Structure formats: structure tokens, C-alpha cells
Amino acid sequence: MSDNGGSRRRSGRNGGLPAGLALLLALSAGAAGQSQERFRRSQPNPDPLPELGLPAVETHRLSNGLRLAVVRRDSLPLLSLQLLILAGEAQSPPDRPGTATLTARMITQGTELISAEDVQNRIEALGAELTVATRLDYTLFGLNVLDDQFERALTLLAPLFQQPAFPKRDLDAVKRTLRYTLLERNQDPAVLAKRQLLHLLFPNHPYRNGLFADDALRAVEREHVQAFYDAYYRPNNAVLVLCGAIGLSTATGRVSQHLNTWAPKDLPPPPLAPVLPEPVPRVCLVDLPQSRDATLAIGAVVGPAGAPDALPLEILSQVLGGTPTSRLFMELRETKGYAFYAFSELELYRSCGLFLIRARVQPEFSGASIRSILAEVERAVTEPLPSYEIEQAKSRLIGNVPLRFEAFDRLALRVAEIHAFNLNEADWSRPYESIMLVNAEAVHAAALKTPLRTPVVVIVGDKSVVLDHLQDFKTVEVYNVKGVFQYNVTRGG
Amino acid sequence: MKETLNTVIEERRAPWLLRARRWAWGLVLLAAPTLPARSAPARFDFPVTTYQLRNGLQVLLTEDHSLPLVSVVVAYRVGSSREDVGRSGCAYLLQKLMFQGSQNIGPLQHIAHIGRVGGDFNATTSEDLTFFYQTVPANQLPLVLWLESDRMRLLDIRTEAVERVRAGLIEEIIERRTSEPYWDSNILFDQSLFPDFSYSHPVIGTEEDVLSLSLDEIAGFYADFYAPNNALLCLSGDFQPMRARELIARYFETLPPGRDIPPPPVGGSRERGGLSQTVRNFLAPTPGFHLGFRIPGPGSREFAILTVLDYILMRGETSRIRKRILHKERLALELIGGVERRRDRAAFRFFAVANNDVMVERCQNAILSELGKIKTAFIGQDELLRAKAMLRMDMVRRVSTSLDRALYLCESVLLQPGFGGFAADLDAYLSVTPSEIIGVANRYLKDTDALGLNIQK
């Protein structure tokens, strides 16, 4: 229904400039360019690189072992609080994946005296935002709150970590909600591809079940959650990071007042990191009927967070597929038109890392896309990268440093990760220098050490379409959507 | 933005934040070139300097030297509301075309330039405004101003680029239509709430309209609206004002202004009277409904009061209506809503889906019953404090990075009549009283004025 759409003076056909004249004007910009100022013709030089004055991180350890890190930022009346528990899905019992995730969610469900509804009421009364994220190596509780509400926030949080109740009724409700979330998440082909990749790259390793299926939750009961909490939710296994308008002494006083009674306990001995098998190249197809596209996850295991090769590999990843102008994107999307996207990234965990290439391609180009990706990987690993590409990647990483630390919660998260992974202090205090020091030789040497040339390839797509386009590969392992092996397709040759 | 999958599961317990920006649009042209100075009732504020170039470009500068970063936003006073009947999607198409190259920048080179220096970029189009924005290391300010000035007036509008963008846009429209089962009903209800064409067609456009847009029309739309005298440039972050002014003058001062664009007509339907419609939607997985009321637009006292009421009723899981419908009585599977703004008009609207038609009816009755309670009893102090605490947090979060701050300023200056700075803006909400809420609810949320649209399977 329109009442006055035609009554107004408009551009284009119904008003404004006559169309032909408008086009002439717009295109005449090109002609006018003959007389444009010279400075418009070329990219300007940057101004001098500013100092990156990252705020200092002040630390203190409470008598119960809780590590407190404070990053003072006075620019906003906001405090970001991140409590990191050094236990994640890798610590879930192998036969009960999801225990870490459920435990974390149950923490926010209250105590004997505070119901889950009360917790929600009190969070909203603070105007706060509480987030819970369970990752492979750690669990992170984040609370963003206005600085004048900090005391009330601590009053709310402290009992949640010290006296959680884990009532069965709430556990069932949380399991139900989580199950719906997982069902939805596990319809995403990118998640399915990553889940299968973790399964195949990390057999007999705690990272294997990092992305667990919804039916895994059935095996987790109240006593398992309680046991996980008892083992890992200890102040001597936690780091509390505060970022905002607060100093260390004030923070220490207030945090001590609320969390000093949290009792420490000996932690379970860390399991020996299992030896990973020698990398063998594999091509695996996860059948997702009626999928319109093919989603690829191609990966290889690399060193852990903090390893000397981490930064050279990050630069390699940037050159290969870090951005829409990197090699993979340009080759697969812009040049060949196979892909909707193609990126690479480095994920670093505590005991190892993952060099991941991910792409979404047209199914009829599945095989050709994999060949192109593997060819680009071969070239990037065996041929030293040109210095201009390395310098561009370094420039991008250097320029991106302050962006990554601008939001208080992201700044606090980075500080928490430095503690979680025992990273080098220079990673924080001198980020520019660390990146600047990486040269072409270091990148080449790091690339040669990786098993990137013998990766595991996972394709998620409709097998009735995709299999026909994987004929180049001698053996294709076929899995169902739950990741259960079905059969091999072997071709002669 | 790259997606990451290393988060196993992430839970966020503040869902109102996700919706806050979605409902925030509208436009009124700023008459005065500078922001009026007002005393700040809240303790947090940030200074803003404004001036105007000879070609009409408005400039806002706000410094923050916490980190060596600068965000640059160019906001054009154009969105889908400026499109003609039968020409929907033109503004959104132009947003995408602005990355396809200009006189001195090759196709997609804008993205490449920003990426190479480690910056972030994006663009958005709404009913009223189009934003182009980027955050870069502070020393790259000249680069961004060079890039933005080149596509202001010097866009390369050629058939090949237009066809590439058009094809992508058609694909996006089809994808949205097929993946969002309530898409059509949403547009239909928009037509009830905002009856003139300006605000009742989708920003993304329709397939037929986008296909029929000619090169001439696109060029004409660009010539009219993407000009310095129809734009606002905002710098936020770590820059030296003198250097910034020098660079802005260098890159923008000599760009020719466009023709004077008459402001869009003020108004829109204020007519009262309820209306209820029913549509059948076989694609919808479950039945649902839209329910809404027309309310006064941004900048009015009533709008501020109804925004606070939005927090009381619909923001957060313990808000009155969400708590009752989703948690206590479990009448609906999904419920969203609140205040939705356009340039000079607004609506208080709800959308819910339920298991069956009976639950739909009970859910509608529950909403009307909760609105009835608001009209007859004062809001308790705790409940009002909770709403204001959430609102205050949302407002602070809206200005928590240099880019957030620049976007907030552009939106507020262009869309909010009498905008007097952050602190004054916040104070307008924090000063709302229980008696004001009762008064406004009785005036604007009458059962007899409710507009409804039932979706049957």
C-alpha cells in the first residue's frame, strides 16, 4: 500500500535529474579526472607509525592461589571481568564429552540460596552481560558491568563459584537447552567439517571430542558435573582478569573480600599428551544429503601456543589465506570461480595447534578446489615466500594489534589467554617487535617443519553429487552426518 | 569477518543487546551545523567538534588517544526510503557498488588497501541512512580519507560492475526469502505500521525491482545522494585535530556538491484505529503473529518514555512480557519486539511464533493484558531501576570503541532531532518517571489502536 510514493521529487526515472544527464554526470567523473588534483591519483604515504602504548598488566596472587591481573583503562565507565578456569573440553572424561560445557553452564544456575531465576534477575538488575564459553583448554566466564556496579557484581559471582548447587532439575533444563543449541549448530556444514577434522587429526587425544554431538550429553549426570567442578573449579586453577577504570590495589582488596574464602585444592595431574600418529594424507566425505554446497576443512597439526614457530606460521597463514586478497581466495574465488570463500587460519591450543584451511565451494568443483588448495599449499611450503608478501602480512598483523585490544572484553580475554598458555611476556608488551623480527627464512623453515603437505581433507556435502567429482583421489572415506565411518570408495590406479 | 569455530559452545545472557541496534533507525536532517553544548547530567561524556566544508560536507571529530587507532565513518542521508515505487533495492545495490572501484581505486581495491594495513571495514544500509566505515592504525588516516573521497562523486558506474553486484543481490534476495519463512509477513506488517511506500518495502529490494534498475537510474541515484552536501564525515579516535582538518580539506574540500535534495516529507500516517489481518503462509513452520502500535518518532519525550517501557516489557529474560510468555506460561516458541524507529515515526511492535492457533491467541491476549497492567498501575522502583540499568549499560556499550562512538554520533546527529550529546541523550531516558509511563501507555498503546497480522499455516 503506498499513499504518497509518487508525490515526492525523486531521483532517476521519476524525478531529479533526467536519467541520461545523471549518467553523463556520473560518468563524466572519469573525464574530469584528466584535470583532477595529482594527489588523488596515488595512494598517500602513511603518517609516522605511532607508539603502541598497551596498558601495563599488573598482577597479584591471592593467598588461595587465585591469580588476579588488572589492566587499567579509564576511558569508559565500564569494567570487563573475565574469570578463566584452566579446564575445558579437553578435560572432560573421554566417555563423557560435554561435561566441561555442562559444568560451566550449571555454574550460572545458582546455589542452594540463589535460584537460577534469581541469578538472571540480579544480572539484569546490574544491567550486566554474563557470557560463558568453554573451549578446548579452558572455560571463560565474562561479565561486563558498569564500574559503579562492580561491588554488586562480585557479590553475585562469588557464591556461584564457591557454592554451586547443581540441582538435577536445573541440570535437565540446561541439558535440554544445550541439546537444541547443539542440534542447530551441528546442522552447519562448517561445524560438521571441523568436528570431523578434529576426530581424524586427534585420535586418542582429548581434543578429539572438542566439538561433540548432541547425544553425548545423555551420559553426563549430576555426579559427573560435581566431580568436574570439584577437580577443576579451584582458585589455584583460575585467573581473574579485570579491565577498566580500576587499579590493582583496589581490585585486590575487593576481590579478596569476596573470593578469599574459595578453598584451594590439589589439582589432578595433567595427563601426558598422547603421541599423535604420523600424518597420513586422507580424503574424507561427510554425507549431508541435499546440501547445496560443498564445505571443506583441510588441516594439519602444528606446534602449540607459544611455540617459536607460531608467529612465522601465522604469517604463512596470512599469505596463504588470511584475507580476501590472499592466495587462496584470489585463486579459488576470483580467478577460478570455484569458491564462495577460501581462508586459512592458525588455531593454537595448549598442547598443539591446528593449521586450518576452510572453504565453501560449488559441489561440482569439489575435486578441483581441493587440488587447487593443495597446489597452493605446496607452493607456499616449498617455495620461499616473496618478501613483499611477507612484509604485507606483517604490516597487516602489526596494524591489527590495536584493533584486537580495543574492546575491554577482548583486551581482558587476551590477557587471560597469555596466562592460560604461559605465553611470553613479550607477546603482550612488545607485539610490534615480535612481528617485525620474523623474516622469510623463519617462515620457510617453519613451513617445512609442518605436515601441511600431508593434510587431512574433509568435505561436507551431498555424496550423490560430490563423489562424482572426487574421482582424482584414490581413496575417499565416506562418513554419515554423525561422523560414523560408512565405507571407502577406492578407485583403480 | 571470519568465523571461528574454536569456541565449543558460547552462551550469552543478555539477549537484549543483540536486538538493541536492530530497532534503531529513523532520520531527521540536522538544521544546525554544531551540536548544542549542554551540561552533562551523567558523569560520562565525550567531547565532539563539528564544522562544515564549503561544499556542504558536515564533519564530526571526537578524539580518544587510548590506542593508536582511528575510525572513519561516512554517512550518507540516503536509504531505501528514498527509492521510488518500482525501484526498490537501489540504495543497497549502491552500497555494494561503492566497493567496485572509483576513478583512482580499482575494483575491490578499497578492501585490499584496508586489509593490507590491518584495518577493519564494513558498510550498512537502512531505510534512512547508508554508512561506510573503517578502523585503521592511526597513521593510516590519509589512506582512508583518500579512499572515501574517491568514491564520493567519482564512483565508476559501469555495466560490468553493476551486473556483478546485481547478480549477487538477486541471489541474496532469493536466499533471504527462502531461508526466512516469516519474511513476507514482516513486509506486509510494515505496510500496516508505516503505510507509505518509503517505509513499507524491504531495504534489500525485490527481485523484480532490482532486475529492472537501469544503469541510468543507478547513476542518477548516485549523483543525487552520494555527494558531500548529503553526507556526514566522522573521525573518532587517535588523531591530531589540525592534521585531521588538513587532510579532510585536502581530500574533500574540492569535491563538487550535488544538487540540493529536498528533505523527505515529514509525517507518515498518524491515523488511529486498529486493524487486524490474517495471511496464510505455507512455508511458515508454525503459526505466529505481528502486533503493533504507531508511536511518536525519535526526539520526542514520548519516544524516550516508550523506550524505557520497552526495557521493562521486552528486554532481558526477566522483563514482564518475555518472562510471562516464554518462561512462565510458555505460550510462544519465540518472541521479539520493542520500539522500532524510522526517521520521523516509530512503532512499538511484537512478533511471536507459537505451536498452534490457540497458543497464538493466548499469547496475544497475554501481551494485551500486560499492556493493560502498565496502563493502570505504577511501575515499581526496582523494576524501573532494572530497566534503566540495562539501558545505561547498552548506551555505554554503544560508544565503547572508536567505531561504535563514530556510528553512534552519526546516527544520533542525523536521526535524532535536538541531539545534545551522549550525556544529555542518556539523561532523557534516565529521567523517565512512572507517571509518565502510565500517561504515554494510555495514550499510545490502546487496544483499539492495535494493528495485528495473524500468520496461519
Image (cartoon, rainbow, N blue to C red):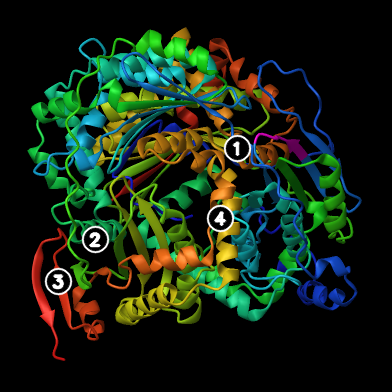
C-alpha gap between disc 2 and disc 3? 13 Å
C-alpha gap between disc 2 and disc 4? 33 Å
Q: In the visual, does A100 lie left or right of B384? A: left
Q: Name the subunit of mark 2.
A: A
Q: Name the subunit of mark 4.
A: A
**Label 4 sits on what residue type?**
Leu
**Label 3 sits on what residue type?**
Val
Residue at left offset 73%, top offset 30%:
B419
Badge 2 vs badge 1, beta-carbon distance below 8 Å: no
Which of the numbered marks, if any, corresponds to residue A478?
Answer: 3
**Label 2 sits on what residue type?**
Leu
Q: Position of residue A66 (x, y in %)?
A: 34, 20
Q: Label 2: few (<14), some or many (≥20) within 10 Å?
A: many
Residue at left offset 64%, top offset 41%:
A52
Which numbered disc, 2 or 1, marks the residue closer to the eye? 2
Which of the numbered marks, if any, corresponds to residue A437?
Answer: 4
Image quarter where the N terminus of chain A lies is: bottom right
B408 or A96: nearer the viewer: A96
Earlier-in-chain disc, 2 versus 3: 2
Residue under numbered circle 2: A197
Q: Name the subunit of mark 1.
A: B
Q: Which residues are magenta?
A: B61-66
Q: Examine the structure image and report whether residue B295 is included in the region drawn in magenta.
A: no
Which of the numbered marks, if any, corresponds to residue B401?
Answer: 1
Say if B179 sits above or below B292 in the image: below
Which numbered disc, 2 or 3, marks the residue closer to the eye? 2
Q: Is residue A456 visible?
A: yes
Q: Label 4: few (<14), some or many (≥20) within 10 Å?
A: few
Going by the picture, which residue comes out furthest to the bottom? A493
Q: Name the subunit of mark 3.
A: A
Which numbered disc, 4 or 1, marks the residue closer to the eye? 4
Which numbered disc, 3 or 4, marks the residue closer to the eye? 4
